[in-house]
Amino acid sequence: MSDEQQAEAEQVDEEVESGIQDGDFVRLAYTVRTVEDGDVVDTTSKEVAEEAEIDVEGYEFEPRVIIVGAGHVFPAVDDELIGAEVGDEGDVEIPAAEAFGEYDEDEVRTVSANKIPEDDRYPGAQVTIDGDQGRLETIIGGRARVNFNHPLAGKDLEYEYEVLDVVDDREEQASGLLGMYLQQAPEVWVQTDEVEEEQVVESDDDEEDEDAEPETELVTVEKDTLYIEATPQMTMNQQWLFSKQQIAQDVMQRLDLDRVIVQETIEGGMGGMGGLGGMMGGAGGADIEEAIEDVDIDADELAAELDADEE
């Protein structure tokens, strides 16, 4: 290879490695619309949502932190982001097959109306039949027609995006990941803790009994810890309730952390004890003792009364 060819090859390699790469944390602003009707499917813009007459109550509209190549966006969008720079904008068309699948007529099925709760027996209701989620289309007599296709099945999508930032700070990365899982990012911080733990003591004694319990010693080690300040919304979040272990493992693996600690703060004054006093008749400790002493119970008399009731 000539010097000129080698220089060109090195230039190509440099261009390939420049910009955003697989595994990078990226903050994106985006809006997803259906190609045919232009209906807004998802957006990080409150203004876009309001223009589309989408209910914005209780929803945080802000750019999302995603990991390139981790399946957080459609594969075609991941491909667009490789090599992109901060400030780049683009539109990616996602065919239905690569979005939410093609529409399948076989997924529209007739089922017994008895499988649907009475309160959900109306067209458009979201129902679950034998573990499958669907939308009730019609109900006549004892039969119901349910569409088990995804609501966006068969629809091509347009993904409009802007790369706002590459996120390198681990706390921002953790906040972004949790926000993606929970739809609301809790307060987080990362710190290195000194923790005492037992470790097996290695022995050079070849004659050591293999069946003997290994010797351990208490040592102090450093652990990179992610602290999460749990909010009431987070503790009630269904995704968190059922998948907290998987979520924590994913965050630790991607951010190279040793552990995750979730903290929950419950605030309130001593006034909260008033209810207990009321239930106890307002009696304090000394009053309770006096009340117990005042109670005169004859065990033999009580047993006789119980026998009489049984007869």
Image: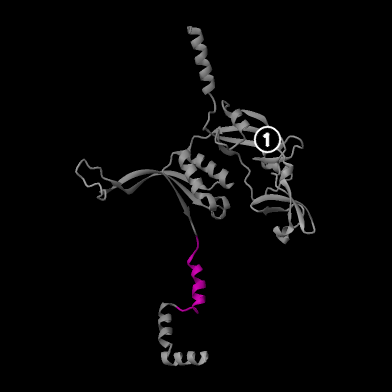
- Counting from the top left corner in percent of width and height, residue 24 is at 52, 32
Q: Is residue 246 visible?
A: yes
From the viewer's perspective, tell me whether residue 193 is left or right of residue 2.
left
Number of numbered tags placed on the structure image:
1
Residue with the mark numbered 1: 97
Residue 134's place in the image compared with 204, above or below, is below
The range drawn in magenta is: 267-283
- Counting from the top left corner in percent of width and height, residue 244 is at 51, 50
From the viewer's perspective, tell me whether residue 152 is left or right of residue 171.
right
Q: Secondary structure at mark 1?
A: helix
Q: Is 91 inside the magenta-drawn segment?
A: no
Q: Is residue 87 visible?
A: no
Residue 258's place in the image compared with 267, above or below, is above
- Counting from the top left corner in percent of width and height, residue 72 is at 58, 38
- Counting from the top left corner in percent of width and height, residue 27 is at 57, 36
Give the quarter of the image for residue 42.
top right
Type of residue at label 1? Ala
